[in-house]
Image (spheres, rainbow, N blue to C red):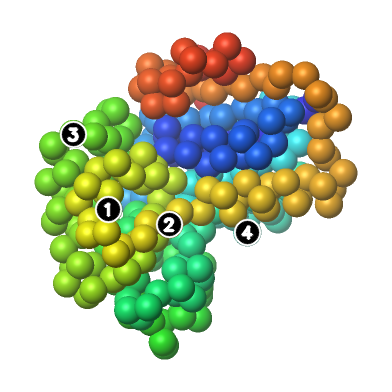
C-alpha cells in the first residue's frame, strides 16, 4: 500500500509523524529529514520553497499518496505553491494560535517559532484574527533547532537559551505557550521544568494527525492493510540523531537510514 510521505528541515517533524503513526497504525510511511539544509527558519522564502519542492518531488517519486509538510516554516511559506504544483493532497502544519487564544484566561499567549514562520504572510493572517482581544508575544527560537539537530534537547545549553527566550512571555503573564515549530515538542521535558504550572503548552501534532485521517478518507486513500505497517525514515545528514530521538531500536518496523536527497 502506498505510504504517507512526511518531510521536515530535520528531525523535529518526527513529533508530527509519531502522532500520525499512532492514529493510523495500518498506514506505511516515509519520512525525509532534510538535516543537511537545517535550519530552514533563517533562509529566504525562495530557498524554503525550492527545498520544499525538492522534498515533495522525492516523496512523490517514492510512491507517496499524500504529503504531510511536518514543518511550520515550510508550510507557512510554501504550502500554497506545493498544492498548486502537485496532484496529490498536501497537509500542512501551522502554530495552534486559535485554541490557545480561545482558552486563554489571562488573555495573553506566547508563540515560540522560527523567524521564517513568524515573518510569513500566512502566520500574520492567522494572528491578526486574534490579536484584537489577545496579547500575543512572539519569540523567535534562535538556535533551538540547531541544538535539537545535534541531539542536545535536554542540555544545559538549551536551558540557558530557553530561560532568555521565555522571559518576555512570562513578563507578559501568558497562560498558553504555542509551540510553532515541529522540533519544539522535543523540548517538553525542559519547558515543563522551566515554566510555571499555570502555563499550558500546546502544539499542533494531534490536529495534523486528525486532519491527515480526514483527508485520506475524503480521497478514499485509506489503507486496507491490517498487518504491521512499515516506516522508513531517511536523513541526508545524521541518521544516528534521528534514530536516537525516536528510539528506533525499540521498533522492528521502523528503519532509519542515510539517503542522499
Ligand atoms: N521543524 C521546523 C519548523 O517546524 C524547523 C524549521 C527550521 O529548520 O528552522 O518550523
Neighbourhood count class around disc 2 (C-alpha, 10 Å): few under 14, some 14–19, many 20 upward: some
Disc 3 CB within 8 Å of nearest ligand 1 atom: no
Q: Residue at x 33, y 44 (%)?
A: 188
Of the numbered discs 2 and 4, the one sitting upstream in the chain is 4
Is the residue at mark 2 in contact range of ligand 1, meaning its CB lies under 8 Å from it? Answer: no
Between the C-alphas of marks 2 and 4, the distance is 25 Å
Which residue position holds label 3? 155
Residue at image point 38% right, 20% down: 244
Could you say whether the residue bearing mark 4 is in a helix, strand or loop? helix
Q: Report how far apart the C-alphas of labels 2 and 3 lie in the structure.
A: 22 Å
Residue ID for mark 2? 202
Front residue of 62/184: it is 184
Q: Which residue is mark 4?
A: 80
Q: Between disc 3 and disc 4, whose residue precedes?
A: 4
Labels 1 & 2 near each other (Cβ < 8 A)? no
The verdict on label 1 being within 8 Å of ligand 1 is no
In terms of sequence position, does the residue under pointer 1 or pointer 4 come before the other?
4
Q: Position of residue 70 (x, y in %)?
A: 53, 44
Res 166 seen here: yes
Look at mark 1 in the image and give the residue it sits on.
141
Amino acid at each position: 500500500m502506498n505510504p504517507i510521505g512526511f518531510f521536515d528541515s530535520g528531525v523535529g517533524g518526527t513529533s508530527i509523524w509519531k502522532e500520525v503513526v499512532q492514529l493510523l497504525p495500518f498506514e506505511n510511511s516515509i519520512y525525509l529529514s532534510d538535516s543537511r539544509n537545517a535550519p530552514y527558519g533563517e533562509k529566504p522564502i525562495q530557498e524554503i520553497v525550492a527545498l520544499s519542492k525538492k522534498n515533495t518531488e522525492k516523496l512523490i517519486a517514492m510512491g507517496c499518496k499524500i504529503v504531510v509538510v511536518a514543518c511550520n516554516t515550510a508550510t507557512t511559506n510554501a504550502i500554497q505553491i506545493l498544492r498548486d504544483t502537485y496532484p496529490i493532497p498536501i497537509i500542512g502544519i501551522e502554530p495552534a494560535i486559535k485554541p490557545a487564544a480561545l482558552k486563554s484566561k489571562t488573555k495573553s499567549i506566547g508563540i515560540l517559532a522560527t523567524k521564517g514562520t513568524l515573518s510569513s504572510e500566512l502566520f500574520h493572517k492567522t494572528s491578526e484574527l486574534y490579536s484584537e482581544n489577545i496579547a500575543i508575544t512572539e519569540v523567535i527560537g534562535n538556535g533551538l533547532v540547531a541544538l535539537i539537530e545535534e541531539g542536545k534537547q535536554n542540555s544545559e545549553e538549551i536551558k540557558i537559551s530557553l530561560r532568555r527566550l521565555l522571559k518576555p512571555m512570562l513578563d507578559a503573564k501568558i497562560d498558553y505557550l504555542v509551540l510553532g515549530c515541529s522540533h519544539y515538542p522535543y523540548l517538553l521535558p525542559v519547558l515543563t521544568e522551566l515554566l510555571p504550572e499555570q502555563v499550558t503548552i500546546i502544539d499542533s501534532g494531534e490536529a495534523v494527525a486528525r486532519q491527515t485521517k480526514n483527508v485520506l478518507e475524503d480521497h478514499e486513500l485509506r489503507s486496507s492493510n491490517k498487518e504491521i505497517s512499515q516506516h522508513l525514515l531517511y536523513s541526508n545528514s545524521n541518521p544516528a540523531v534521528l534514530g536516537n530521538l525516536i528510539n528506533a531500536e525499540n521498533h522492528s518496523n521502523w528503519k532509519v537510514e542515510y539517503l542522499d536527497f
